Image (cartoon, rainbow, N blue to C red):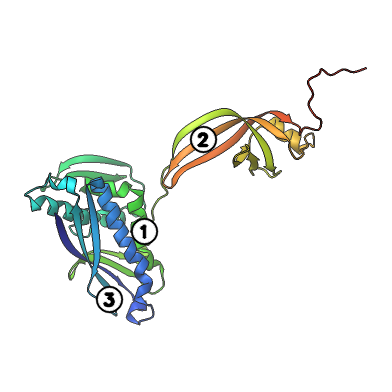
């Protein structure tokens, strides 16, 4: 079961009018549009549907107009749910373009233009619109913007935001100053080069998942005497970079009261923190206390007590 919807992406400006730019240089932005649609489908429908995107027609000189054909293909497990009703599939496929602002009067692109990178102060639910979609009111101070909940879900997603920024990347090049989205000759969204900053993707929030203090032993791979620089330490199987925050130990090092030789070991109390990020996990090591500095062995260990004359 699938629905096919056509829409148009356009770039314009002096560089294209004067044939000073090869349209193929804009190919990364077209790939970003496919990424944007796929990311939006994932946000709105999870693993229940996969969107497919094709370019229709040819590139035109004077401006750069590309007609996309997009559709949602429902997976077999979902077909049973929608058996006998094409209308449900059509509504969900169209919802993706509506949530982005490709069709309809609201959506992600119009919302980002309205926000102009201003921080949102609060969001409140205000009911449903005529098709029964949940609607919300987004506040920036006393100003507000009403849109559907699906649009807010796209606004929050890092993948969607990064793809949106990449779609508009050509506007950062000299000679391309207008981006437009719509269907046929109807333009629904226009973004100018002066507005690109409103579409910059914010950095993804990191969440702390582990904060633990443990005892560990290291050999020194490399050390630094510069403030805030990290030491390279090895636990025998891997090498880490660690911040040394033991003030007494650092004073001894900087005061030449500590010296190090190859094979020395440090027994440390280490704070290990791990964050979940958009690119996976990130781990930081902080040596909060150097418990013992073990010198490299210089004598053969024998099983008798020390006997001195």
Mark 1 neighbour density, 10 Å: few (under 14) some (14–19) many (20 or more):
many
Whether residue 61 is visible, yes or no, is yes
Measure how far apart labels 3 and 1 are at the Cα level: 22 Å
Q: Secondary structure at mark 3?
A: loop
Q: Is residue 13 left or right of residue 226?
A: left
Q: Look at mark 1 in the image and give the residue it sits on.
A: 165
Check residue 273 in the rendering and tell me which mark sits there, or answer none: 2
First in residue order: circle 2 vs circle 3: 3
Q: Secondary structure at mark 1?
A: helix
Measure how far apart labels 2 and 3 are at the Cα level: 51 Å
Q: Position of residue 294 (x, y in %)?
A: 73, 30
Near-viewer residue (19 or 75): 75
First in residue order: circle 3 vs circle 1: 3
Q: Position of residue 37 (x, y in %)?
A: 27, 57
Check residue 114 in the rendering and tell me which mark sits there, or answer none: none
Residue farthest toward the front in the current orientation of the protein: 303
Compared to residue 283, the image places residue 303 above or below, namely above
Q: Quadrant of residue 81?
A: top left
Q: Quadrant of residue 6?
A: bottom left
Residue displayed at 35% across by 69% down: 27
Mark 2 neighbour density, 10 Å: few (under 14) some (14–19) many (20 or more):
some
Near-viewer residue (207 or 283): 283
Q: Position of residue 60 (x, y in %)?
A: 27, 78
Residue farthest toward the right in the current orientation of the protein: 309
Tags 1 and 2 touching, CB below 8 Å:
no
Compared to residue 119, the image places residue 304 above or below, namely above
**Quadrant where the N terminus is found in the figure:** bottom left
The total of numbered circles placed on residues is 3
Q: Look at mark 3 in the image and give the residue it sits on.
A: 59
Near-viewer residue (154 or 232): 232
Q: Is residue 49 left or right of residue 20?
A: left
């Amino acid at each position: 079961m699938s629905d096919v919807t056509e829409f148009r992406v356009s770039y314009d400006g002096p560089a294209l009018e004067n044939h000073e730019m090869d349209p193929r240089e804009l190919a990364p932005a077209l790939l970003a549009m496919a990424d944007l649609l796929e990311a939006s489908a994932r946000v709105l429908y999870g693993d229940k549907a996969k969107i497919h995107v094709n370019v229709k027609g040819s590139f035109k000189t004077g401006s750069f107009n590309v007609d996309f054909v997009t559709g949602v293909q429902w997976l077999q497990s979902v077909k049973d749910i929608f058996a006998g009703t094409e209308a449900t599939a059509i509504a969900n496929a169209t919802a993706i373009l509506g949530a982005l602002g490709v069709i309809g009067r609201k959506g992600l692109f119009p919302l980002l233009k309205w926000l102009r990178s201003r921080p949102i102060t609060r969001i409140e639910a205000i009911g449903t619109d005529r098709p029964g979609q949940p609607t919300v009111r987004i506040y920036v101070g006393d100003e507000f913007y009403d849109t559907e909940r699906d649009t807010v879900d796209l606004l929050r997603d890092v993948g969607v935001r990064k793809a949106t920024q990449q779609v508009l990347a050509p506007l950062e090049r000299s000679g391309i100053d207008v981006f437009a989205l719509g269907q046929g000759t109807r333009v629904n969204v226009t973004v100018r080069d002066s507005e690109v900053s409103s579409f910059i993707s914010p950095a993804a929030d990191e969440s702390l998942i582990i904060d633990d203090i443990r005892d560990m032993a290291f050999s020194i791979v490399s050390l630094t005497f510069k403030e805030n620089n990290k030491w390279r330490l090895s636990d025998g199987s891997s090498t880490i970079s660690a911040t040394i925050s033991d003030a007494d130990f650092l004073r001894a090092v900087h005061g030449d009261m500590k010296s190090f030789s190859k094979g020395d070991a440090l027994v440390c109390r280490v704070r290990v923190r791990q964050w979940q990020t958009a690119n996976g996990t990130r781990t930081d090591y902080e040596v909060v206390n150097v418990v013992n500095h073990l010198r490299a062995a210089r004598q053969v260990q024998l099983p008798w007590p020390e006997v001195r004359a």
